[in-house]
Amino acid sequence: MRVNFVKSVLGLLFSLLFSYALYSFSGISIEEKNLLSLGGFLTSFFIMLFLIALRFDSPRTTINARFTSAFFLGGTMITHIILAFTGLTQQIYITIIGFIMLFYIFILYSVARVR
């Protein structure tokens, strides 16, 4: 597995902009905004690393990991946007995003283990 530094920085910048947008446009309390923007940053940056910055030894594994990452990035972005404009509690947010990220890690691990 190889990491492209320039693409990693671009993923970091994208994630920062996404978390800023979540913070700016949501109409929820400050504590919930902080949780939403921090969680949005961490999840989008983690997924963006696998989407654009990492390359596996096998081209097939790389393509499968990128497709899976693109699907989950879109899903988590939509989920964050929905949670930004609806009633958000800390328990609901952590549960929903936690399940999504654990499912993503499980699928990505399964994709990477296939030879």
Image: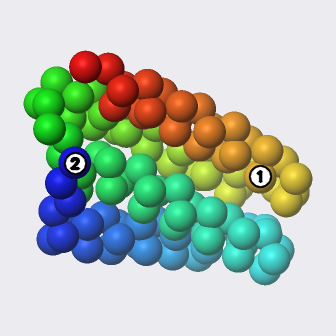
Give the amino acid at mark 2: Met
In front: label 1 or label 2: 2
- Specify the quadrant that holds the C terminus: top left
Snapshot quadrant of residue 56:
top left
Placement of 86 over or under 56, stated as above or below: below
Q: How crowded is mark 2: few (under 14 residues within 10 Å), some or many (20 or more)?
A: few
Residue 20: percent from left, percent from top: 51, 75
Query: In the displayed structure, does residue 89 sit left or right of residue 112?
Result: right
Placement of 67 over or under 88, stated as above or below: above
**Residue at x 25%, y 73% (from the top left corner):** 9
**Residue at x 88%, y 53% (from the top left corner):** 91
Question: How far is disc 1 from disc 2 in space, using C-alphas?
Answer: 32 Å
Query: In the displayed structure, does residue 90 sit left or right of residue 58?
Result: right
**Residue at x 16%, y 62% (from the top left corner):** 4
Residue 74: percent from left, percent from top: 44, 40
Residue furthest to the top in view is 115
The one of 56 and 13 positioned closer to us in this rendering: 56
**Residue 82 visible to the viewer:** no
Query: In the displayed structure, does residue 66 sit left or right of residue 23?
Result: left
Residue 1 is marked as: 2
Query: In the displayed structure, does residue 11 sit left or right of residue 42?
Result: left
Q: How crowded is mark 1: few (under 14 residues within 10 Å), some or many (20 or more)?
A: some
Residue 50: percent from left, percent from top: 32, 48
Residue 93 is marked as: 1
**Mark 1 residue element:** helix
Q: How many numbered badges does the structure rendering display? A: 2
**Residue at x 78%, y 80% (from the top left corner):** 30
**N-terminal-most mark, 1 or 2:** 2
Placement of 71 over or under 90, stated as above or below: above
Give the amino acid at mark 1: Tyr
**Mark 2 residue element:** loop
Snapshot quadrant of residue 15:
bottom left
